[in-house]
Image (cartoon, grey):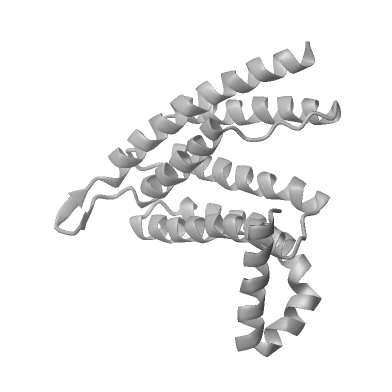
Amino acid sequence: MSTTQLNLKNKIKSFFFRHFPKLESFSNKYGKHLPNILTALRILAVPVFVLLLIDPSPQMGVWAMILFVVASFTDWLDGYLARLYSAQSILGTLLDPLADKILVMAALVMLCSSPIEPNVPAWIVVILLSREFIVTGLRSLAAIKGIVVPASDLAKHKTAWMFIAIICLLVKEPYALFDTLIDFHFSGMIFLWISMILSVYSGVSYGIQLRKLFS
């Protein structure tokens, strides 16, 4: 962590502790555990998310979308808290990406299996999930050899587009926003196609990179 980041972290802590004195004792006692707690809550939210989508009604889709957005926000929050409290752990390093993948996989499978048309084509879901399993396996092999393969910029863009796509696809129904009718399913499919293209391209890039490392 750079000096600037460290100073900013200390300023944030001092601001909250000055205005909320009880927060300091809570922070000292539980701060380092909060990232893993949030990650665990994100995993526990997946069954609730799936139950909501078993009912294919538009109302349940909106509630599932809200839960997905909240769970996605905790992904950013647990990373921020881990840096704030210097609470990076082996458990957190393992569970955090796992929780993200479980949530995204659950969303894609449920969107694909929706009994109400239009839904997400199964072949797109197969490509996306296959890529995740292959890349995760390759990165695990690299980790065994002591090689750390960070997420590429393409992979980060892929993830961002996928999250936007899932949010739109969960809403599904057309809604009027600012006097403009938006077809959320159509928009979501465009974003999902973008994510799929980036997913395949970044997956091939990982394969080439790791092939060079292994050879």
Say which quarter of the image contains residue 192: top left
Q: Residue at x 40, y 31 (%)?
A: 194
Q: Residue at x 66, y 79 (%)?
A: 14
Where is residue 195? Give x, y as percent.
45, 33
**Is residue 79 something that shows in the picture?**
yes
Viewer-closest of 7 and 91:
7
**Is residue 78 something that shows in the picture?**
no
Q: Is residue 209 positioned above or below 139 on the image?
A: above
Q: Is residue 35 positioned above or below 190 on the image?
A: below
Where is residue 196? Give x, y as percent.
46, 28
Q: Is residue 119 positioned above or below 26 on the image?
A: above
Where is residue 88? Give x, y as percent.
77, 55
Residue at the extreme left:
179
Say which quarter of the image contains residue 5: bottom right
Q: Is residue 171 left or right of residue 96?
A: left
Quarter of the picture holding the C terminus: top right
Where is residue 91? Give x, y as percent.
80, 51
Q: Is residue 64 left or right of residue 141?
A: left
Q: Is residue 129 left or right of residue 93?
A: left
Viewer-closest of 131 and 211:
211
Say which quarter of the image contains residue 183: top left
Residue at the extreme front:
3
Residue at the extreme top:
215
